[in-house]
Each structure stands twice: as C-alpha cells, then as structure tokens.
Image: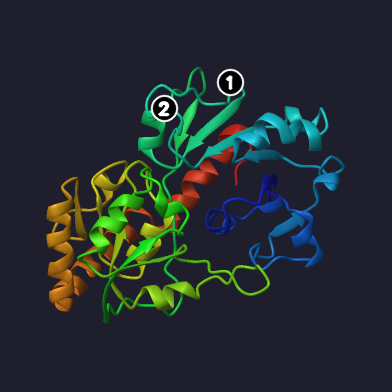
C-alpha cells in the first residue's frame, strides 16, 4: 500500500524525528524563516517535507495530526479547506494539563478526532470528556556513536534559565540542591542551537554523556523525552517520583526517584563519589529504555492507530 500523506506541524522537533521513522510522508507546516532555508535541518529525513501555511489548502492528505491547541482551535480553520477538515484527524497531546492538574477539560471536543496521549499519566490527569483516547508511549533511539562515560562529577539538569525559574519545572529545587551538589543546566538531549538558529541533532549527547547523572527536577510534568534519550545512552537518572517518572525509574536499578529532596541529594552524592556505581545504574537505565521505549513498539503502536483512523493498513 502507498504511504499515507500526513499533514502536521513542526512541534516538537525531537518527537517529529522519531515519528518520521514511520513509512509515511509527513508534510509539516513550517514558518517562513525556515522555508527560506529550503529544507530545515530540523526536518531531517526524505519523508519529511516543509510546507507553507498558504500551500496547505491546495494539497491532498490522508490524515491530519494536531499537536497544539492553536493548531486544532484556530489554524485548521485558517489554513485548511472544508474537505481537509473532514479527513481522519488525530490530536497528539504531549503535555499534562496546565491550568488545573485534575479538572482541566481537554480542548478537543469532537468524537471524530482520536486523542493520543504520550503517557498514561497524561491520559489519567486530563478530563478527556467524550473523546476516544489511546496512549502511545515515547519511542527513542540512542544517539549514534555516543556512550555514557560520566567522567565529569556533576549532574545534568534539562531546561533553560527562564524555565528553571518556575516551581512547576522545579526551578527552586534546582537552586536549592545546586548549593550543595554541582548541577549544570542545558537544553534537550538531541538538539542544541547553532549560530543561525538551526538545531544540530546529536551534538549535545556527546557533552551530556560526560556528566555523572541526569536530574529530572520537574514537579508536575509527565515525562520528558530527553530523559529517555539519556537512558538510551546509558545515563543514570535521578528525579522526583511524580508524573510518569515513578513508573519509569526503578530505585537502585536505573537511578533513583523520590519526593524527599534530602534523600535525592544523598543519592546524588553517592553517584558523585562512586563513578562505578553510577555506570552500573546507567546500564540498568539503558536496558529499561530499550525494553519499554524501543522504536519497534513505538512504530507498531503508531501504525495501529493510523490504520484505525484511516482504515488503511501500513
């Protein structure tokens, strides 16, 4: 069967990279600045095609994949014609509810749209209303030719300075533990900006792999894909036992999760003092990531969902 023509949007880049491993053609609404550079380096893959918003209504697609509220609530009416808006549609929800942890209604209110959550925690916390839902957990691949060394006695914290100021993402925790434990913040595991604003995939893991452990400081965020990418290269994880993290990290096997910051600080110091122990936990994290978040399962789940909504076997 011919590959499906799927219209989606550019965000988030890491997820799109893994999604594009499917045997389908992805047409990605892309802003003008990136179109001027023709094929953005973020949209790597011969089956990923940047598309201007003005072009979208003149193309033919088999499925529409929304990933943000503005795309579903506004942009489909601005950029798509009436026939396209009747195509099989999926809304991919990446985040936990932001306004209220348990009582926030999901913006999609249309039984003809399939709501796909990236974690079971997200599906649990959202008020999904009358929507049919599915959970497709993350899939990831280890960065090529990158292995954890942990040679630097410090912890890596994902995020950016502005993000680290908020309590939801644990800015206060980062500052508090940073007074006694060497912690460094950075961007995502697979993308780092270059001088021209583009994103260079797989450069950051080389630097990240040198840190002793990764610290997931988010109080209320289901699961960061970058945590899985770190596990894939054999990096031990320390984090709060909140969201989906509690089901991903097994204490003493792949890292440590807890809600007691004093205990987390103790575990951090253990890894800083004993690089061999950190390496052993990293191997456990790698095994866990490959078993649960391998690409074979991820792609099979997506093929099943696409077959469900379009009636076409991949």
Among the two numbered marks 1 and 2 on one chain, the one whose residue lies closer to the N terminus: 2
Q: Residues within 10 Å of mark 1 (few under 14, many from 20)?
A: few
Inspect this view and state whether residue 237 appears: no
Residue receiving disc 2: 100
Marks 1/2: CA–CA distance? 18 Å
> Which secondary structure lies at badge 2?
loop
Residue 290: mark in rendering: none
Q: Quadrant of residue 16?
A: bottom right
- Image location of residue 258, percent across then percent down: 18, 48
Residue in the picture at 49% in, 66% down:
190
Please say if 211 is above or below 107: below
Q: Residues within 10 Å of mark 2 (few under 14, many from 20)?
A: few
Inspect this view and state whether residue 32 appears: yes
**Closer to the observer: label 1 or label 2?**
2
Residue in the picture at 46% in, 29% down:
99
Residue in the picture at 14% in, 72% down:
277
Residue in the picture at 31% in, 57% down:
174
> Which secondary structure lies at badge 1?
loop
Residue receiving disc 1: 109
- Image location of residue 170, percent across then percent down: 34, 49
Depth check, front residue: 118 or 218:
218
Please say if 98 is above or below 103: below
211 left or right of 41? left
- Image location of residue 130, percent across then percent down: 51, 17
Please say if 24 is above or below 70: below
């Amino acid at each position: 069967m011919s590959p499906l023509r799927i219209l989606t949007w550019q965000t988030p880049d890491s997820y799109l990279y893994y999604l594009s491993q499917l045997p389908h053609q992805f047409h990605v609404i892309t802003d003008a600045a990136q179109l001027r550079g023709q094929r953005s380096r973020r949209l790597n893959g011969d089956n990923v095609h940047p598309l201007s918003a003005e072009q979208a209504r003149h193309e033919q697609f088999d499925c529409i994949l929304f990933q943000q509220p503005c795309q579903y609530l506004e942009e489909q009416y601005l950029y798509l014609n009436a026939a396209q808006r009747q195509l099989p549609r999926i809304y991919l929800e990446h985040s936990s509810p932001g306004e209220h942890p348990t009582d926030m209604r999901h913006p999609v209110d249309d039984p003809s749209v399939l709501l796909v959550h990236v974690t079971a925690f997200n599906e649990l916390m959202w008020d999904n209303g009358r929507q049919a839902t599915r959970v497709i957990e993350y899939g990831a691949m280890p960065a090529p030719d990158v292995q954890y060394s942990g040679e630097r006695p410090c912890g890596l914290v994902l995020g950016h300075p502005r993000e680290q100021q908020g309590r939801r993402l644990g800015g206060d925790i980062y500052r508090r533990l940073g007074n006694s434990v060497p912690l460094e913040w950075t961007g995502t595991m697979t993308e780092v900006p270059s001088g021209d604003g583009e994103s260079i995939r797989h450069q950051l893991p080389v630097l990240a792999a040198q840190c002793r452990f990764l610290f997931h400081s988010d109080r209320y965020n289901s699961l960061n894909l970058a945590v899985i990418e770190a596990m894939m290269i054999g990096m031990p994880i320390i984090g709060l036992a909140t969201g989906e993290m509690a089901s991903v990290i097994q204490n003493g096997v792949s890292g440590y999760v807890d809600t007691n910051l004093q205990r987390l600080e103790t575990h951090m110091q253990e890894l800083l003092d004993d690089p061999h122990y950190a390496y052993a936990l990293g191997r456990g994290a790698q095994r866990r990531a490959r078993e649960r978040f391998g690409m074979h399962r991820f792609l099979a789940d997506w093929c099943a969902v696409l077959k469900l909504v379009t009636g076409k076997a991949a």
